[in-house]
Image (cartoon, grey):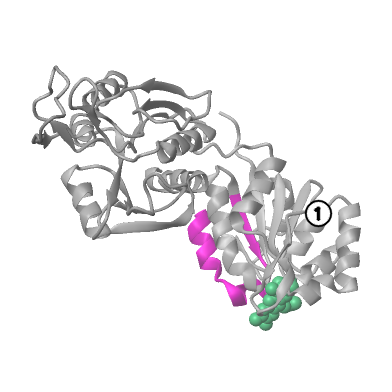
């Protein structure tokens, strides 16, 4: 087993300090060992208790009693593989540039000879101030690394540079620096269905729906990018998944169920994105139905792939999709319960949204009344967000 990378997270007294809790959470979730050091002012913005709870460890405050550990700054500097200070105030930037050592965080930084990453966060005028810019340039020359800041809207209402990078983007920078990848579904076996199914009426006609297969293929791509071993069972559609993803092409709901059952053994997750035909033709005509006169087509309820799988394989994490034209929540939660699945992803459909469109929005429902809205966006981006959210629910 490889040893965990140890990160000392410094929190200083800026308005973005509340985001440090999310940074600590993300670091821990990504398998880093985290200890937190706070400045005195940081405690005006967020309580040490928040970090103590997240890290399940003591937080080192500016006035941490040192009688048991007189060389605390040296011990912390030896312990950490990397120091991340997020947010970094203008004050802290200045202190670190001038070699100040008047609290536990600055003293530890001075005693530290490995990588220090600063995530500045301040008003645009503070950031653009010559003093701050000189400190910033000096620190860069000395090998101090920076994650941000970014241009954007600020807590004070200004728009400009100085905004702290979002926690997930800071995490990406840390991962890149430590060469640690964030594969959320590494080696997980995932079976996904996509596209429509077709039900034959006679040798030339069939019943189907408008599913393009895009959502299912993009979800397969997103799981694959997160390290999963993906198998895609696809109904007839033109949308293509990444070449590296293994797929099986099927036509009817029955074929799809057979394919799923043949391959489900050993899977960790089953994602049913396919728009499976809810009805099938009662009496399949062996001959082409003559066009001279009207005829009545009788339909019967089709097999329910998702329900069958969740019932038979209750150790598999099952995710279903529900396209609804009305009463989204009511219908989705009903399906979640009736089919006894782990998560349901519901989306509103009409002639202009959801199915056969390039963008979509989804609401996830799971557990006892939990829900999360994934806002309208391009289906590729939505699939990436979907997979990240599923990782939160699954873990
Ligand atoms: C409400 C409030 C918000 C502040 N936000 C910021 C900020 O976002 N960035 C910054 O550099 N300073 C900010 N400051 C100023 C710092 O808190 C101040 O410079 C403090 O001395 C920083 O101490 P520290 O870096 O040791 O934590 C803010 C002050 C107040 C009162």
Residue nearer the viewer, 220 or 35? 220
List x then y, in percent, for residue 251: 29, 24
Q: Is residue 376 above or below residue 123?
A: above
Locate residue 39 relative to residue 215 in the image: left or right: right
Residue nearer the viewer, 217 or 83? 217
List x then y, in percent, for residue 50: 51, 65
Work out which quarter of the rendered image holds the C terminus and state it: top left
Please give the count of numbered marks on the rendered protein: 1
- Disc 1 secondary structure class: loop
Q: Which residues are magenta?
A: 34-56
List x then y, in percent, for residue 148: 73, 58
List x then y, in percent, for residue 181: 61, 37
- In which quarter of the view is residue 199 placed? top left
Residue ID for mark 1: 111
**Residue visible at 34% across and 38% down in the picture:** 273
Q: Is residue 356 above or below residue 282?
A: below
Residue nearer the viewer, 81 or 111? 81
Locate residue 117 relative to residue 356 in the image: left or right: right
- In which quarter of the view is residue 372 placed? bottom left
> Is residue 49 located in the magenta-colored stretch of the structure?
yes
- Which quadrant of the render holds ligand 1? bottom right
Q: Residue furthest bottom?
A: 156
Q: Is residue 383 visible?
A: yes
**Residue visible at 78% across and 68% down in the picture:** 92
Work out which quarter of the rendered image holds the N terminus and state it: top right
Q: Residues within 10 Å of mark 1 (few under 14, many from 20)?
A: some
> Is residue 342 located in the magenta-colored stretch of the structure?
no
Q: Is residue 185 visible?
A: no
Q: Is residue 317 above or below residue 331?
A: above
């Amino acid at each position: 087993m490889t040893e965990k990378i140890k990160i000392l997270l410094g929190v200083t007294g800026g308005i973005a300090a509340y985001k440090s809790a999310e940074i600590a959470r993300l670091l821990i979730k990504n398998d880093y060992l985290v200890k937190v050091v706070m400045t005195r002012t940081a405690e005006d913005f967020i309580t040490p208790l928040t970090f103590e709870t997240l890290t399940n460890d003591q937080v080192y405050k500016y006035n941490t009693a040192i009688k048991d550990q007189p060389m605390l700054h040296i011990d912390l500097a030896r312990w950490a593989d990397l120091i991340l200070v997020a947010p970094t105030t203008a004050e802290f930037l200045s202190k670190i540039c001038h070699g100040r050592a008047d609290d536990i965080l600055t003293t530890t930084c001075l005693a530290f000879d490995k990588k220090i990453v600063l995530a500045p966060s301040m008003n645009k005028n503070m950031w653009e101030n010559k003093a701050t810019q000189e400190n910033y340039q000096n620190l860069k020359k000395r090998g101090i690394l920076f994650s941000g800041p970014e241009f954007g809207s600020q807590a004070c209402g200004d728009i400009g540079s100085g905004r702290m990078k979002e926690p997930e983007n800071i995490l990406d920078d840390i991962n890149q620096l430590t060469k640690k990848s964030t594969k959320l579904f590494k080696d997980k076996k995932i079976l996904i269905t996509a596209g429509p199914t077709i039900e034959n009426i006679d040798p030339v006609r069939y019943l189907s729906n408008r599913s393009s297969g895009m959502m299912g293929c993009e979800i397969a791509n997103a799981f694959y990018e997160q390290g999963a071993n993906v198998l895609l069972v696809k109904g007839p559609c033109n949308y293509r998944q990444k070449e590296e993803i293994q797929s099986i092409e099927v036509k009817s709901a029955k074929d799809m169920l057979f394919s799923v059952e043949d391959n489900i053994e050993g899977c960790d997750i089953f994602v049913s994105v396919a728009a499976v035909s809810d009805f099938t033709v009662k009496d399949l005509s062996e001959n082409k139905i003559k066009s001279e006169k009207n005829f009545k087509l009788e339909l019967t309820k089709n097999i329910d792939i998702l329900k069958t799988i969740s019932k038979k394989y209750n150790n598999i994490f099952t995710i279903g999709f529900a396209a609804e034209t009305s009463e989204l929540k009511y219908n989705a939660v009903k399906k979640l319960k009736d089919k006894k699945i782990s998560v349901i992803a519901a989306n509103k459909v009409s002639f202009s949204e959801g199915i056969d469109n390039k963008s979509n929005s989804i609401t996830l429902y799971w557990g006892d009344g939990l829900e999360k809205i994934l806002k309208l966006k391009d289906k590729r981006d939505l699939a990436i967000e979907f997979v990240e959210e599923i990782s939160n629910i699954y873990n």
